[in-house]
Amino acid sequence: MERREARALGSPLRLLVAGRVGATVVDAAWAAVRKEFDSVDRAMSRFREDSEITQLHRRAERGEASDPLSSRLRAALALADRAHRQTRGRFDARVILDLERLGSPGVRQSWSGAKRDSSRAYQLDPRRGTAELRSPIDLGGVGKGLALRWAARRAAATLGRQGFLLEAGGDIAARTRADGRPWAIALEDPLGGAMPIATCTLHGGGAIATSSVRLATWRDARGLAVHHLIDPHTGAPGGGGLLAVTVAGPDPAWAEIWSKALFLEGPAQIGAVARGRGLAAWWVCAEGSVAMTPAARQLTTWVRAEALTS
Amino acid sequence: MTERSARRVPPHVLVMLSTSTAAYALALAGVAGQQSAADASLAAERAPLARAVEQVSVGHDQMGARLDRARSRYAAAAQAYLAAGDSITTLEVQLGTLSKAVSAVAGVSRSLPATVRLPSVAGSVARGRAPATHATTGASGH
């Protein structure tokens, strides 16, 4: 097993390549992966002054039209727009305004005086390749999912039929191993325990992503504990009664989107919504119990303590 | 002697004739000069008008050519529109079929129960010690 590690998009980045494979090939795949993550960082990072998304915000704030956008940023904006519609507004890139209002440590003042309204956050012009930004947005989560999607494609192109696993800050994309054995994945305990809450396999590759309140939790101005998973319908932290949601699927970007959207459904609705959409989803309730959909059960190899709910 | 004297023109008459001829010649030259100046002035005044008329004529020719081109484009567009019309008709028919199918599916889905009580099944998930894994999915703060 060959392994390469670094940091990208503010998270650990890791590549595992199964079986016997030359270090040169792995290095080439790793370089392609790093390059893809760097490109996404330059396009979508709100922590970089020279990133495309920051420049787009600056121009919009000054009332100027946008320059033609890179294909990566256009893809991310189109995906975020589609996710907003598919999740019936549970996914919304504009929650950065609420995070800012709640005093999220990582969020800077991005657009003075901006407010979220009912209209769309931006309007893409596919002919000119530009976007009219109407509100500040954060593409962090979508960006990581897309970086995984694109980097996995590049790694696959370099590694050929060699199986590999690519992990970026808790989100994973994998391709089938050459020996046919599936990749085994642990689902982290959101309460911080060393033992996972469950384990599963990714047959034939695919992706898995988790939204959890274990990190990015702080106290607001009133001293109340809040977290970063904001319900766009209320502008407040959502999913009360849930600690973490994991979603497995063919694409890392959509796994990331659905893990967030399902989390915001809360413990009462998450089962029906996830089953209705045929998603493989696991969720951990506040008391530490685990529940899952039938699609997730087919992937599960071990569970610590399952909730007796249907 | 008398005949020669009778034919002879008196000098004062000759002087008068010469003087009046010279005056006439001078007047004629003056009038001709004035007319020439007036003609030149008129020609200079008419030159811009002539140029404008020429430009209007050229513009008219260009507009005519443009109109010809627009006419041909309009004809081509009309032909394309007619061609597209067939495709749109086909598409409309297909949309109609799809609409019927959607209505049928919607009817079936409405007739389904909102929830289905599933029978209990024996858990096939292993318990006890967690198996070895290659990676962990978890919180990232995004």
Image: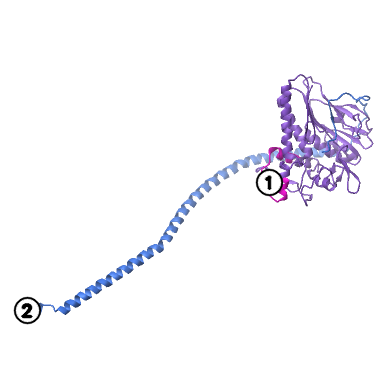
Q: Amino acid at mark 1?
A: Ser
Disc 1 vs disc 2: which is toward the camera?
1
Residue drawn at the location 41% of the way across and 64% of the way down: B45
Q: Residue furthest left?
A: B1
Asked whether the viewer can see residue A303, the reply is yes
- Residue A263 drawn in magenta: no
Q: How many residues crowd around disc 1 within 10 Å: few (fewer than 14), some, or many (20 or more)?
A: some
Q: How many residues crowd around disc 2 within 10 Å: few (fewer than 14), some, or many (20 or more)?
A: few
Q: Chain of mark 1?
A: A
Do the residues marked 1 and 2 share a common chain?
A: no
Give the numbered dot on residue B84: none
Residue sitting nearer the eye, B68 or A42: A42
In the rendered structure, the colour chosen for chain B is blue
Percent coordinates x, y for residue A71 in the rendering: 69, 38
Name the residue that disc number 1 marks: A66
Asked whether the viewer can see residue A160, the reply is no
Q: Vertical placement of B24 versus A84: above or below?
A: below
The residues bearing labels 1 and 2 have C-alpha atoms spaced at a distance of 118 Å
The N terminus of chain A - image quarter: top right
Percent coordinates x, y for residue B110 in the rendering: 84, 40
Q: Which residues are magenta?
A: A56-79
Q: Amino acid at mark 2?
A: Glu
User: Chain coloured purple: which letter?
Assistant: A
Name the residue that disc number 2 marks: B3
In-image side of B59 versus A44 (left or right):
left
Q: On the image, which quarter does residue A83 sit in?
A: top right
Q: How is the image coloured?
A: by chain
Q: Vertical placement of A72 versus A31: above or below?
A: below
Q: On the image, which quarter does residue B140 sit in?
A: top right
Q: Secondary structure at mark 2?
A: helix
